[in-house]
Image: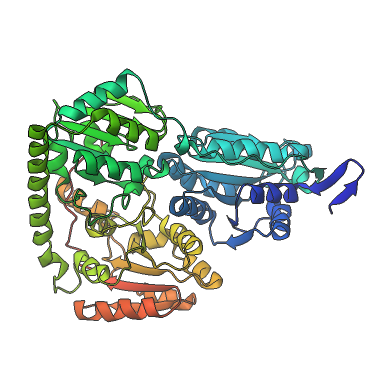
């Protein structure tokens, strides 16, 4: 019970947690019921914070990260002690690599009984610490508000990421003093100062002279609110733009300077690459996607911990809008002859882009049964609104989607990111629809990925969250089966049960189900699912012989 004294209001620890969350703008807390968290639940009810309970703690943490990805605001989850926190570790790791601002609240065995063998007693902090911006324990009830303030600021400061605080059972049930001061306003680092100095001058000089510049932007651009500055930079200086990760949609897919199919040619042919908010990791061939003699300029909100795998011409660190504006101003408009060469460069990429898009038409209308994954996306694209949110969870099936699904606004494409953890999609989609209830939210998942979090269809049904899931059901682990057969001539542990009626599983869990075996059945099934007003699963049998074409660039 909370009490009033002459010294001020005293609140139980869970109420202190919830009140501070409310002050920091948290409106939704994802969780799975656990006794160590009861007082936090009580506080959340009192403070008007919505509780969304799921079927596995991994989903609670992925949902909190999904909330952050879709809103660019802090996402929050509460995981009970011991196995609850451990079950959330994959999502915490994903958030770390995705730079997603995530607040994880953990239950914890009682402080006064620590070391005596209480239920689910384990020290989470040293386990979580390598993955989090901060990991700490509120060993006294009075510490709770201040520790949450520190954790929130850490999670939102660049590079953003997960923060972890756990609460001993006794301390979170005890009373503590409510702080006299309200929570400080959340940091908005993108409004700060941009890069300056010699590296900015060098980057501007290279940009002014470049004949074939490109912009390669990624997730950091999205977190840094840099999309408007990027568009103006690209338009004024005539620079083609390629996007990956959460940057998809930061320049609309139908903008004249956006390219996707011409990416390998554009990056390899560039004489200058502005790499904005994306590491030179396996997705960029560890820097080898650019020509050896190309100048590469790294632009980030904060200096990364890792060394770059190739020599850079310049490194610019600071708030992205201010940095990109300063670079544009300092580079000035190109001379007439350089401008002509840039326009020729853009025209050549546009011809290639158009040619490759035309070359996809056959796959997009492929009549085979079981279906080619591209046929699914050809039909789906016609039904998606411009602001639809598309969530990917799978291997080859989602790789095809990443190639052909176009995005037109920031926050409309959500995938696991470089950690590549399957099972993230249900949580991401749940959060996306809760955060953006008026938009279409479509989850694309393989039958393999379904096995990690398929029971969350129950969560969608219980909470009335009308996500449409579209499954590519080929009965194999395609991302592993095809490469292993290419290497060894055989594959092992790469097969699933073919033709499983996952749509019936969806129906049993309270959702709308559709089963598609032929191309002619696809469009009506998608339309019925979208119109159902319920969470739905469209189970599409896809051709297991289809392998996504990829290079061996993982290591």
Q: Identify the residue at the far top of this view.
A: 198
Q: Quadrant of residue 287?
A: top left
Q: Is residue 283 visible?
A: no
436 to 491, vertically: above or below: below
Look at the picture and state if 175 lies above or below 476: above
For the C terminus, the image quarter is: top left
Quarter residue 295 falls in: top left
Residue at image point 34% right, 24% down: 307
x and y percent of residue 317 in the render? 38, 28
Q: How is the image coloured?
A: rainbow
**Residue displayed at 41% across by 27% down:** 305
**Does residue 395 appear anywhere in the picture?**
yes
Depth order, front residue of 184/125:
184
Q: Position of residue 380 (x, y in %)?
A: 27, 69
Q: Residue at x 36, y 48 (%)?
A: 246
Q: Up-down: is 388 above or below 302?
A: below
Estimate the x, y position of residue 195 in percent, counting from the top left.
38, 27
Q: Is residue 217 above or below residue 363?
A: above
From the viewer's perspective, tell me whether residue 150 is left or right of residue 430. Answer: right
Q: Nearer the viewer, residue 314 or 77?
A: 314
Left or right of residue 338: residue 11: right
Residue at image location 47% in from the left, 68% down from the top: 457
The total of numbered circles placed on residues is 0
Q: Residue 350, percent across and down?
A: 11, 50
The N terminus lies in quadrant: bottom right
């Amino acid at each position: 019970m909370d009490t009033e004294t002459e010294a001020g209001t005293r609140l139980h620890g869970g109420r202190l947690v919830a009140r501070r969350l409310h002050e920091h703008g948290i409106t939704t807390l994802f969780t799975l019921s656990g006794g160590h968290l009861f007082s936090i639940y009580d506080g959340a009810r009192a403070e008007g914070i919505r509780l969304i309970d799921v079927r596995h703690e991994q989903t609670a943490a992925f949902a909190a990260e999904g909330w952050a990805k879709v809103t660019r605001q802090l996402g929050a989850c509460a995981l009970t002690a011991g196995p609850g926190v451990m079950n959330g570790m994959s999502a915490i790791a994903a958030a770390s690599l995705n730079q997603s601002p995530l607040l994880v609240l953990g239950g914890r065995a009682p402080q006064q009984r620590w070391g005596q063998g209480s239920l689910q007693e384990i020290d989470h902090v040293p386990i979580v610490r390598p993955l989090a911006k901060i990991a700490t324990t509120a060993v006294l009830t009075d510490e709770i508000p201040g520790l949450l303030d520190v954790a929130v600021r850490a999670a939102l400061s660049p590079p953003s990421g997960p923060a972890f605080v756990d609460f001993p059972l006794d301390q979170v049930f005890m009373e503590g003093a409510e702080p006299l001061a309200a929570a400080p306003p959340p940091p908005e680092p993108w409004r700060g100062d941009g890069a300056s100095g010699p590296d900015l001058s060098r980057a501007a000089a290279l940009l002014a002279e470049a004949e074939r510049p490109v912009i390669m932007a990624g997730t950091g651009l999205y977190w840094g609110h840099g999309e408007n500055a990027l568009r103006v930079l690209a338009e004024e200086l005539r620079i083609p733009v390629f996007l990956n990760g959460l940057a998809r949609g930061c320049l609309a897919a139908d903008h004249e300077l956006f390219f996707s199919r011409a990416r390998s040619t554009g990056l390899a042919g560039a004489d200058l690459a502005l790499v904005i908010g994306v590491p030179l990791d396996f997705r960029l061939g560890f820097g080898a996607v650019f020509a050896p003699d190309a100048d590469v300029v790294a632009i980030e909100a904060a200096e990364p911990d890792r060394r770059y795998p190739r020599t850079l011409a310049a490194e610019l660190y600071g708030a992205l809008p201010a940095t990109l504006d300063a670079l544009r101003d300092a580079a000035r408009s190109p001379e007439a002859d350089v401008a002509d060469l840039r326009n020729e460069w853009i025209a050549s990429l546009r011809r290639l882009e158009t040619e490759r898009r035309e070359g996809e038409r056959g796959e997009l209308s492929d009549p085979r049964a079981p279906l080619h994954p591209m046929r699914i996306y050809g039909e789906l694209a016609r039904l998606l609104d411009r602001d639809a949110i598309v969530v990917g969870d799978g291997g080859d099936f989602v790789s095809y989607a990443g190639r052909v699904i176009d995005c037109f606004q920031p926050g409309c494409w959500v995938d696991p990111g470089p950690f590549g953890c399957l099972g993230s999609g249900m949580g991401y989609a749940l959060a996306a629809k809760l955060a953006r209830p008026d938009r279409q939210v479509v989850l694309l998942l393989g039958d393999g990925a379904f096995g990690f979090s398929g029971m969350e269809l129950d969560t969608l049904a219980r909470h009335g969250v009308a996500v449409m899931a579209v499954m590519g059901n080929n009965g194999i682990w395609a991302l592993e089966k095809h490469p292993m057969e290419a290497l060894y001539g055989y594959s092992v542990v790469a097969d699933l049960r073919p033709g499983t009626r996952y749509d019936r599983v969806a129906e049993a869990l309270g959702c709308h189900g559709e089963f598609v075996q032929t191309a002619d059945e696809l469009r009506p099934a998608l339309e019925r699912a979208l119109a159902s007003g319920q969470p739905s699963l469209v189970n599409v049998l896809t051709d297991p012989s289809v392998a996504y074409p990829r290079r061996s660039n993982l290591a």
